[in-house]
Image: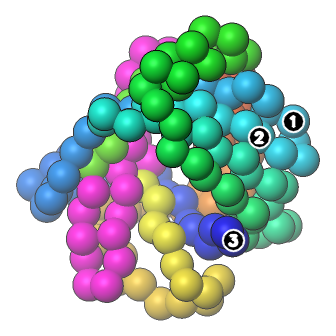
């Protein structure tokens, strides 16, 4: 239930050629408090409710709890979320023993492409693909909960 991840901007579309799987994700937030977020997500044909705790100072580690819910329940919960629904396509790229999740944002976040890699420890080594750009781990404006309030096209 502890999530360890690093986040990067993406510099090219080369990841698309390496993609093993992609799917659309629509999500909203029932709560975007800095101490915790509560997210509702429709990912493919599944719904999810997720609670995330506050990140450590580096932004790499935080508590995460997720429960699968019905699509119907997720759709109903999305209707009562805070303003700012996130719409994105997620591409999964396997590289070595890691999977990079690359999110191409749409709607008010059009043009933003971010990659995340989950790790087993904070200092775990991972191969960095050539399309990986500036690290933005812990940069709050790149959190989905913040993109829902202050979208990329308003920066």
The image's mark for residue 81 is: none
Residue ID for mark 1: 33
Residue found 56% across the figure and 67% down from its top? 6
- First reached walking from the N terminus: tag 3 or tag 1: 3
Circle 2 Cα neighbour tier, 10 Å, few/some/many (<14 / 14–19 / ≥20) = some
Residue ID for mark 3: 2
Marks 2 and 1, Cα distance to the nearest angstrom?
6 Å
- Whether pointer 2 and pointer 1 mark residues with C-beta atoms closer than 8 Å, the reply is yes
Against 128, is 15 above or below? above
Residue ID for mark 2: 37
Left or right of 76, for residue 97: left
Q: What is the span of residues highlighted in magenta in the rendered image?
A: 92-114
Q: Is residue 104 magenta?
A: yes
In the rendered image, which quarter is residue 39 located in? top right
Residue found 36% across the figure and 51% down from its top? 102
Residue 146: x %, y % from top left: 70, 32
Circle 1 Cα neighbour tier, 10 Å, few/some/many (<14 / 14–19 / ≥20) = few
Residue 13: x %, y % from top left: 21, 47
Q: In what element is the residue under mark 1?
A: loop
Q: In what element is the residue under mark 2?
A: strand
């Amino acid at each position: 239930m502890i999530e360890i991840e690093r986040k990067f901007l993406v510099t090219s579309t080369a990841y698309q050629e390496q993609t093993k799987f992609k799917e659309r994700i629509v999500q909203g937030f029932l709560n975007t408090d800095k101490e915790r977020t509560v997210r509702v997500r429709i990912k493919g044909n599944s719904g999810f409710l997720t609670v995330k705790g506050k990140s450590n100072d580096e932004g790499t580690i935080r508590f995460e709890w997720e429960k699968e819910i019905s699509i119907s329940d997720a759709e109903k919960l999305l209707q009562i979320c805070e303003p700012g629904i996130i719409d994105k396509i997620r591409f999964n790229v396997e590289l070595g023993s890691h999977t990079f999740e690359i999110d191409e944002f749409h709607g008010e976040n059009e043009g933003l492409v971010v990659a995340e890699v989950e790790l087993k420890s904070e200092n775990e080594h991972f191969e960095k693909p050539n399309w990986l750009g500036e690290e933005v781990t812990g940069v709050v404006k790149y959190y989905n909960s913040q993109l829902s309030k202050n979208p990329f096209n308003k920066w």
